[in-house]
């Protein structure tokens, strides 16, 4: 036999205009600062390399692989590690960029999924589902978004790996005796252009996705647990509403308070859409 839990409600005014159409707040200043810091470190590394091997960088030209510099191993054995770090450092930069990109994309898709409850009745998505709940996604992002992004990032990593690479050259005399050894870091323009083009496509995809507006019938909560909790108080007449499909709106089975304010939140029963200018609890 199901037992209805007694709820205690706190009354207060809803100060937000719930029907104002809102777009996703991306806070570009915080990410711009991260990009600037990353570019400063990259430029610092390039300046250090150019200072150490000044005069050894030939002019850029064509789409063929061209040596950026050449150093002799018999003078400084650590030049090998310097070349390896230089050739693979772009992979680390791309990985950090992907982490920031994934964070922005997750926030945008989360806000869109939450706002859909204002117009569409849908079950909850949880780790351990029961009732009519759905299982949680493996990657937290809809597959129609994350799969193309992951495939594109694989090609970006592959193109960057072919843009910078290390070549070890060993020299022998006419008698077949080893005389010298050189190691150089090479670059290629073709994979560079491909990597930049794919990165530009990812950026345009994110910009295009940011133009999509959220549903105006629900406040923007993002991942704020306080805002989500405020909308998650069902009426006293509902039994286990979390196991059923939910929709956000004005609850029909809850009487207004003494000031005429009606309660809003998620409900497994029929709800009314919010009205602009009305005060709710």
Image (cartoon, rainbow, N blue to C red):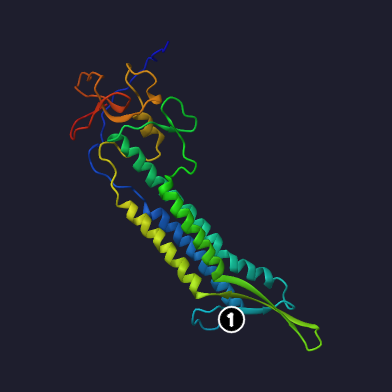
Can the viewer see residue 221 in this picture?
no
Instruction: Answer above or below: position of 182 versus 159.
Output: below
Can the viewer see residue 262 in this picture?
yes
Viewport quadrant of the C terminus: top left
**x%, y% of residue 213?**
28, 47
Viewport quadrant of the N terminus: top left
Q: Is residue 158 left or right of residue 249?
A: right
Instruction: Answer above or below: position of 213 versus 96.
Output: above
**x%, y% of residue 279?**
21, 29
User: Circle 1 sits on which residue?
Assistant: 54
**x%, y% of residue 251?**
26, 24
Secondary structure at numbered mark 1: loop
In the image, 259 versus 109, the foreground residue is 109
The residue lying at 19 percent from left, 21 percent from top is: 259
**Mark 1, other Cα within 10 Å: few <14 / some 14–19 / many ≥20:** few
Instruction: Answer above or below: position of 9 versus 96.
Output: above
In the image, 77 versus 1, the foreground residue is 1
In the image, 3 versus 12, the foreground residue is 3
């Amino acid at each position: 036999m199901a037992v209805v839990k007694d709820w205690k409600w706190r009354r207060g005014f809803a100060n937000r205009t719930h029907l104002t159409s809102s777009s996703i707040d991306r806070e570009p200043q915080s990410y711009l600062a991260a990009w600037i810091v990353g570019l400063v470190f990259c430029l610092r590394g390039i300046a250090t390399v150019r200072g150490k091997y000044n005069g050894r960088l030939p002019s850029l030209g064509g789409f063929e692989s061209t040596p950026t510099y050449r150093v002799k191993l018999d003078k400084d054995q650590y030049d090998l590690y310097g070349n390896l770090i230089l050739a693979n450092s772009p992979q680390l930069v791309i990985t950090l960029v992907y982490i920031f990109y994934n964070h922005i994309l997750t926030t945008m898709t989360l806000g869109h999924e939450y706002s859909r409850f204002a117009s569409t009745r849908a079950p909850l998505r949880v780790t351990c589902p029961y009732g009519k709940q759905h299982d949680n996604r493996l990657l937290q992002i809809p597959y129609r978004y994350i799969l193309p992004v992951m495939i594109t990032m694989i090609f970006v990593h592959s193109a960057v790996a072919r843009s910078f690479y290390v070549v070890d050259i060993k020299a022998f005399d006419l008698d077949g005796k080893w005389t010298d050894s050189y190691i150089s870091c090479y670059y290629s323009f073709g994979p560079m252009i491909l990597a930049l083009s794919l990165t530009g496509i990812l950026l345009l995809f994110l910009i295009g996705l940011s133009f999509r507006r959220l549903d105006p019938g629900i406040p923007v909560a993002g991942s704020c647990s306080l805002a989500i909790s405020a909308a998650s108080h069902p009426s006293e007449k509902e039994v286990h509403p979390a196991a059923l499909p939910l929709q956000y709106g004005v609850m029909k089975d809850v009487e207004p308070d003494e000031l005429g304010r009606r309660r809003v939140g998620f409900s497994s029963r029929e709800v009314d859409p919010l009205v602009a200018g009305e005060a709710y609890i």
